[in-house]
Amino acid sequence: MSIHSPKLDTSTIRIISSEEDHVARNYHALPVVISHGEGVWVTDVEGKRYLDLLSAYSALNFGHGHPDLLAAARDQLSRLTLTSRAFHNDQLAPFAAALAELCQKDLVLPMNTGAEAVETGIKVARAWAYRVKGVPEGAAEIIVANGNFHGRTTTIVGFSDDEQARDGFGPFTPGFVSVPYGDAEAIANAITDNTAAVLIEPIQGEGGVIIPPEGYLARVRELCDTHNVLFIADEIQSGLGRTGATFACDRDGVIPDVYLLGKALGGGILPLSAVVANEDVLGVIRPGEHGSTFGGNPLAAAVGRQVVEMLATGEFQKRAAALGEHLEAGLTALIGHGVTAVRVAGLWAGVDIDPSIGTGREVAELLLARGVLVKDTHGQTVRIAPPLVIRATEVDWAIEQLRVVLES
């Protein structure tokens, strides 16, 4: 495992310059151009290898090019890729049945991206409030948490407190009440007769892998039951094995009314998201009220079904739990040595960098030079989320690179 120079090669500079000339600048990417990936490793255009500790924000939970997922995609690619929902296809029903069983729910509403799943969940919650709960038309409210990240559509950024995501994009959609994350009593105080749902991330990923206090999710579940309010769990980043359980809610023994899923559901091959709930909730949506040309397409459904089958074995959840303990031990040893705090849930960690050492971005760039890919968030935090197929020796090597960077 070689140590790489931070100096950019000519090919890398040329490709990045071309991208900046022709692609809108909505990302501040690290200066690396990846051309191949296998398992937990990726290779750039110059032939340098890097350990991927981001997994495309948990979309690559099963690693790059998992053979079972590629086989499912190739087989379906040669048969049928798209019909739209104007017609039935032979892959959607078995995918939906498998996913519903995994979630212990009745129905699946397939979409493409995580933000689409969130937007769909919002529409479902409002329709349920009006048609089932009896909230006056136009008065439904959804309680959300400060520090949330549910996507970047105009509705979603409207209830975000990230000014970078909000500034210049108003006016925003009303109907959202924001409370401090991790404070269940703040939710209790915010609930009214017009409350349709509580929408939260069981663990806030973009916020820096923020884990709520013990008992928080159970209390939210209790409050929602008491007040006839839907509990919507955004498990788009935290779900599907990442935290050492199938869903982050499982860690607290909680089952929400609605799961919002995405990212890893598409196996890192194509976009696939879903809203999963019981008939008494998702059954409120009528034909023509919501849809997607690509949502539930046979190619995505075939890959998604394979993802569900892999998760059903429990293998990936067990790996994430065991290796997560290994990761936490290694990162915790760095506290006081350039790290001020560490938060770990399975193979998912937020590492707060001591400001006297540098910013999260600077640490990410130095790790890049040493062959490790991570991404910063909120200034001082580095997020770590390797594919669940990573080995303990690779975890150790990555932590050693971080230690060297901090010491330097």
Image: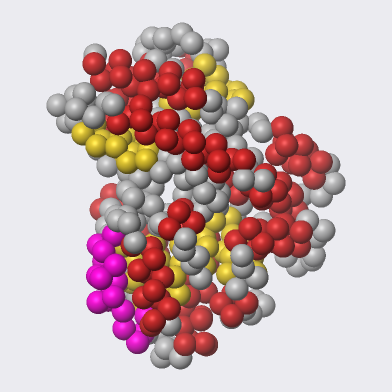
All told, the count of numbered labels is 0
* Residue drawn at (45%, 75%) of the image: 230
Residue 293, can we see it? Answer: no
**Quadrant position of residue 405:** top left
Where residue 304 appears, as percent x and y from the top left, is: 67, 50
In this rendering, the answer to whether 384 lies above or below 215 is: above
Q: Residue at x 21, y 25 (%)?
A: 338
Q: Nearer the viewer, residue 246 or 1?
A: 246
Q: Is residue 194 visible?
A: yes
Q: Position of residue 314 (x, y in %)?
A: 62, 45
Residue 303 relative to residue 195: left or right:
right
Q: Is residue 189 magenta?
A: yes
Task: Name the foreground residue: 197 vs 269.
Answer: 197
Q: Residue at x 76, y 59 (%)?
A: 94
Q: Quadrant of the C terminus?
A: top left
Position of residue 92 measured from the top left corner of the image (x, y, whole percent): 74, 59
Q: Please report the bounds of the magenta region as a residue range.
A: 179-196
Q: Is 252 situated above or below 352?
A: below
